Image (spheres, rainbow, N blue to C red):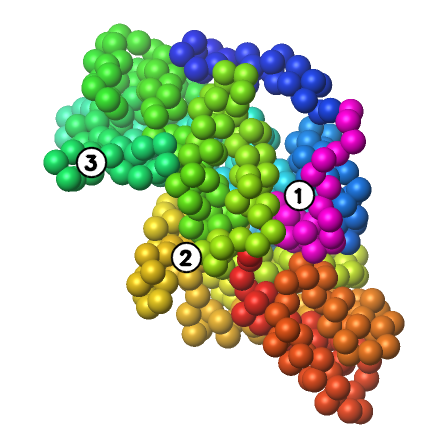
Amino acid sequence: MSLTSRCGALLLCAAFIAPAAQARIFFKAGFEAPTDVPATDAEAARFLTQATFGPSLTDIARVRAIGYSAWIHQQMNQVPMTAARPHMEAVSAAMVAAATGDTIGQNQRMSRWFHTAATGQDQLRQKTAYALSQIFVISDTNGSISGEPIQMSEYWDLLARNAFGYYRTLLDEVTYNPSMGKFLSHFRNRKAGTGREPDENYAREVMQLFSIGTVERNLDYSPMLQSGQPIPTYDQAVISNYAKVFTGFAYANAGTNLFGGTNTYQPMSCVATEHDTTLKTVVGGSTIPAGQSCASDVRDGLNLLASHPNVGPFIARQLIQRFTTSNPSPAYITRVAQKFNNNGDNERGDLNAVIKQILLDPEARAANPPATFGKIREPLLRLTAVLRAWDFQLPAATQYGEIRMGMTNPTGSYAQRPLGAPTVFNFYEPDYQHPGALADANLYAPEMQIINEGTTYSISNSLADYTFRYYVGMTNPPTDRPLINVSALTALTTPAAMVDEVNKRMFYGAMTSNTRTTLVNMLSFMNGASASEKARSLLQIAAMSPEFATQR
């Protein structure tokens, strides 16, 4: 079954929109001198902190040379995607060929993820995939997919391929993906029978988490009210009817046997005899006619969700929270949602336009944002920012082609693991308000939901490994992790110069005078310490600091 046949006519999929998109790329790329070149390295680095896994000197120079818009254009249209699944397949094949008893696992998936985050050229695509992975959640904590790292890598690649595509296509591919099918149990979901009803898991979450949310929203994400109360977007009857839509899914090569086929990452097929063909009343009171095929039911059901007015503000707010600020203003959400609804070419759900608006919005690029703008830096993104800010000597590839990054299970240290959230609700909830001053001010801070005394210690301990303990020039260095090269700091002759270099690379020039004075004094007091120890101590303390843990 082709992707275009699934998407249908109500909302065009990327295959149909491609010519318009190509024309837009050609005509909007522009040949004029850039007008949005940042004035300083600090401004470029702040933008890259939002748009990537962390600024590098190379990217800072590139943004300074061509401007924000051109950098985004290059990332979206010219930089090849770094794929995870083919690499995992190659590592697995090498293991099989070596006949050593080693098998592919989630450790190799983590190594590949960290290597891509640290060194991949397609930073904006991968950062967007990371944001989408926290909306369209699957997790290797689920036993049904924990032993399938290659299939999970394909799911990551699915998100990366669709990062700048169309929401409707993404929703379709997520729905048909077997890893999602197993995670949310619509894989081999059967129509009603004696003592059996269709599984409702995916039916509930595709609405609650992937598209429309639980209450009707205005364009600025404020709830619509009726008699002073929020208006629900759906009820239990709608969930039950959508559960019927998602019946009959099986492996791509299952044929007519729901339980046939072999494990594959290819999009799921649908076994007609196990699909519910009754009339279905779904979101907004719309009906899906009786007697349709599985593909037609899924197409119609997803079209109704994707065209719902809630989707724009619902997706906009969550993506803004992942890139720029936990507390976007209603106007910011509205502008992004408007881009979702119409990219300027009368196309809906264009994630290319949505990501551009998020990053180039006046609130995101304001030189002096209000105190409520910004976010806690995700714990994992503190580590990736360190890996990108400084030169690291990577270990040689193993005999299987894996480049180990010293981090196979970051959950223990960072309370996060790519495609490894504890539940379908992600690591934290978008509406989390930390008790105390933030909650009293009615401010959201999703990342604070996983920050506590224990994780503060474990994050700091791990960052110390990368910034201080393991370095180029050490005696008996490990061979399974990167070693930091601090020569850029040891070449500087004064504590002030060293701190200023850290400020440029890690704090986008926003280090406060108090922190700068503290760090300069620390280095000045380290009499007798080697240049390397001073540099590494400076990086360790900087990486552990509250200022580095926040993103403005």
Q: Earlier in the sequence, mark 2 or mark 1?
A: 1
Q: Position of residue 473 (x, y in %)?
A: 83, 73
Q: Is residue 33 left or right of residue 184?
A: right
Residue 123: assigned label: 1
**Would residue 421 appear left or right of 499 to someone viewing this image?**
left
Q: Which residue is mark 3?
A: 225
The first of marks 3 and 2 along the sequence is 3
Q: Position of residue 13 (x, y in %)?
A: 50, 17
| Mark whose residue sits in front, 3 or 1 | 3
- Mark 1 packing: few (<14 Cα in 10 Å), some, or many (20+)? many
Q: Residue furthest left?
A: 227
The region drawn magenta spans 31-54
Residue at position x 20%, y 36% from top? 225
Crowding at dot 3, Cα within 10 Å, few <14 / some 14-19 / many 20+, comes out as some
Q: Amino acid at mark 2?
A: Ala
479 falls in the magenta region: no
For residue 447, side relative to residue 546 (left or right): left
Q: Is residue 418 visible?
A: yes
Q: Amino acid at mark 3?
A: Leu
Position of 415 with respect to 123 (left or right) is left
**SS at badge 3:** strand
The answer to whether mark 2 and mark 1 are in CB contact below 8 A is no
* Residue 34 magenta: yes
Please tell me in which quadrant of the rendered image residue 407 appears. Answer: bottom right
Q: Considering only vertical position in the picture, is 527 above or below 55?
A: below
Q: Mark 1 and mark 3 in contact (Cβ < 8 Å)?
A: no
**Residue identifier under label 2:** 445
In this rendering, does residue 315 appear at all? no
Disc 2 packing (10 Å; few <14; some 14–19; many ≥20): many
In which quadrant is the C terminus drawn? bottom right
The CA span between labels 2 and 1 is: 24 Å
